[in-house]
């Protein structure tokens, strides 16, 4: 008889304690709101204010028709800069307000993180890499990565030269009629794998191996599965895709091969520190070898390079694809850009020469404005906090953010706001960058402590590739009359590709 009584008392104590926590939290939050003069943000009208099934279904339907970003833009046009939605009993604050974004990413950086849901969604592919971790683990990983993007590495065009040569040759073999987006993704995977692993995947080669193609397809499929899991949120438990798990395994196995080589290289250096290095070792910088000097944990190394490879490939390839998508539709921009390239071009092309190509910089900046690599992003509050903006009907009052609430921000919507970029904000006008000096309203590579560490590398590779192609080809012809259709993976790309005909220099 004693055991049931003890069980009953323990159960009652648990209930009482839970009620105490709920009531105490409620009053503490109410006092916090009153103390800081917080007002609630606007709410998106919902038929289902708890699970948010109507909002989720709208999002999925729009994404299926390549129109999620248009839907998000429409919601902001109707509701304002900041509004909330409720899905799966969780509040999400949606914003395109640069002041609020700056607060979350920088001013109150410690109050927000990636959150457990994001880690759980992405962990099958990305593990505990720099894009899924927080706090001390993230800071340690960031510190490991930062030295690999110093100027000496970023400005070394030899990293890209062979791969762009192969791209130009492949375009010629295809009779100058190609989908440039497909080629850019292959080329950037080749160049970035060489930088990260020390060996190119080799997709641009005539005799690309079966393992290279298998890795490429597995990387794409694993990425798509990760995005689906992120969209499902708490319903990701319903994601039962054996091919996704197998794709993640293939990606990891491919990376593990190079991790093993890097650790063996590290061991040789430790055992024979004075041994004369061969020509390859002395001249070639390998990102993974540098990481291995600071840790011998193979899982950490694998997670880091998979994170970096995906980010580097998608950011750069997407930027190149959107750039040529617009150039094919803007002959006057192509003409002006080519004149800029030819005026400063050198053989071989140097970093200093590219830096002189001012209009090239404007074109890339404008492409990143209209088509930011990460069109939407999010952070989760790791404690109750107050943000100085976002509350009230006009979004100008302080706003209370409860622990575990999510702030989702859209650079895509923000970059197209007429109040920030003028009445022609939807237009592709590189000349605006002659005088425009933005602050937090322009965030193509994020901001604050988690600003993209490889942004300079991505811009350098993109600049070099664009300059080489405009030097090699005198004209571009658009073969696709359709408007762009979004493809949202871990970054923004084109569902309809970049189908063009290039005209070789006579």
Image (cartoon, rainbow, N blue to C red):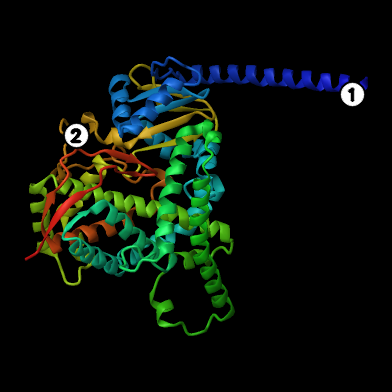
Q: Which residue is mark 1?
A: 3
Q: Position of residue 119 (x, y in %)?
A: 53, 42
Q: Which residue is mark 2?
A: 425
Residue 240 picture quarter? top right
* Residue at figure coordinates x 14%, y 54% from the top left: 501
| Of marks 1 and 2, the one in the foreground | 1
Task: Return the residue found at the far right.
Answer: 1
Mark 2, Cα crowd under 10 Å, few <14 / some 14-19 / many 20+, is some
Q: Quadrant of the C terminus?
A: bottom left
* Residue at figure coordinates x 38%, y 24% from the top left: 58
Looking at the image, residue 48 lies above or below residue 205: above
Looking at the image, residue 76 lies above or below residue 155: above
Q: Is residue 356 visible?
A: no
Q: Position of residue 145 (x, y in %)?
A: 45, 58
Task: Return the residue found at the far bottom.
Answer: 276
Q: Position of residue 189 (x, y in %)?
A: 36, 59
* Element marked by disc 1: helix
């Amino acid at each position: 008889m004693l055991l049931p009584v003890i069980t009953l008392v323990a159960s009652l104590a648990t209930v009482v304690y839970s009620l105490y926590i709920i009531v105490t939290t409620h009053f503490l939050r109410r006092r916090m709101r009153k103390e800081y003069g917080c007002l609630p943000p606007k709410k998106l009208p919902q038929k289902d204010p708890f699970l948010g099934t109507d909002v989720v279904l709208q999002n999925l339907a729009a994404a299926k028709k390549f129109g999620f970003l248009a839907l998000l833009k429409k919601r902001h046009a109707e509701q304002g800069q900041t509004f909330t939605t409720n899905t799966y009993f969780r509040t999400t604050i949606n914003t395109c307000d640069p002041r609020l974004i700056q607060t979350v990413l920088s001013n109150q950086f410690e109050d927000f993180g990636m959150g457990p849901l994001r880690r759980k969604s992405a962990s099958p592919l990305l593990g505990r890499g720099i894009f899924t971790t927080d706090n001390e683990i993230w800071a340690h990983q960031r510190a490991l990565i930062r030295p690999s993007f110093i100027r000496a590495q970023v400005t070394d065009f030899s990293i890209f030269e062979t791969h762009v040569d192969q791209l130009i040759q492949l375009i010629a073999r295809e009779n100058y009629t190609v989908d440039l987006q497909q080629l850019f993704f292959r080329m950037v995977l080749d160049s970035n794998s060489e930088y990260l692993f020390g060996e190119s995947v080799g997709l641009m080669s005539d005799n690309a191996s079966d393992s290279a193609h298998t890795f490429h397809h597995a990387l794409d499929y694993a990425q798509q599965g990760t995005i689906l899991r992120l969209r499902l949120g708490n319903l990701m438990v319903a994601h039962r895709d054996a091919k996704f798990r197998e794709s993640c395994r293939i990606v990891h196995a491919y990376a593990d091969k190079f991790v093993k080589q890097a650790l063996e290289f590290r061991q040789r250096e430790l055992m024979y520190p004075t041994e004369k290095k061969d020509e390859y070792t002395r001249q070639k910088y390998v990102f993974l070898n540098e990481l291995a000097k600071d840790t011998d944990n193979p899982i950490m190394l694998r997670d880091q390079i998979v994170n970096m490879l995906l980010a580097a490939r998608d950011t750069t390839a997407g930027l190149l694809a959107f750039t040529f998508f617009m150039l094919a539709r803007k002959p006057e921009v192509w003409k002006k850009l080519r004149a800029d390239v030819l005026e400063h071009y050198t053989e071989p092309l140097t970093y200093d020469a590219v830096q002189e190509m001012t209009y090239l910089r404007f074109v890339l900046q404008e492409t990143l404005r209209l088509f930011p690599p990460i069109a939407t992003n999010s952070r989760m509050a790791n404690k109750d906090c107050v943000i100085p903006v976002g509350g009230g009907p006009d979004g100008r009052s302080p706003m209370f953010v409860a622990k575990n609430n999510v702030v989702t921000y859209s650079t895509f919507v923000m970059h197209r706001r007429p109040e920030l970029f003028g009445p022609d904000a939807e237009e592709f006008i590189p000349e605006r960058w002659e005088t425009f000096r933005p602050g937090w309203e322009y965030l193509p590579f994020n901001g604050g402590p988690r600003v993209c560490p490889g942004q300079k590398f991505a811009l350098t590779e993109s600049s070099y590739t664009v300059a080489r192609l405009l030097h090699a080809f005198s004209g571009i012809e658009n073969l696709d009359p359709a408007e762009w259709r979004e493809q949202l993976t871990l970054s923004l790309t084109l569902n309809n590709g970049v189908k063009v005909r290039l005209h070789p220099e006579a």
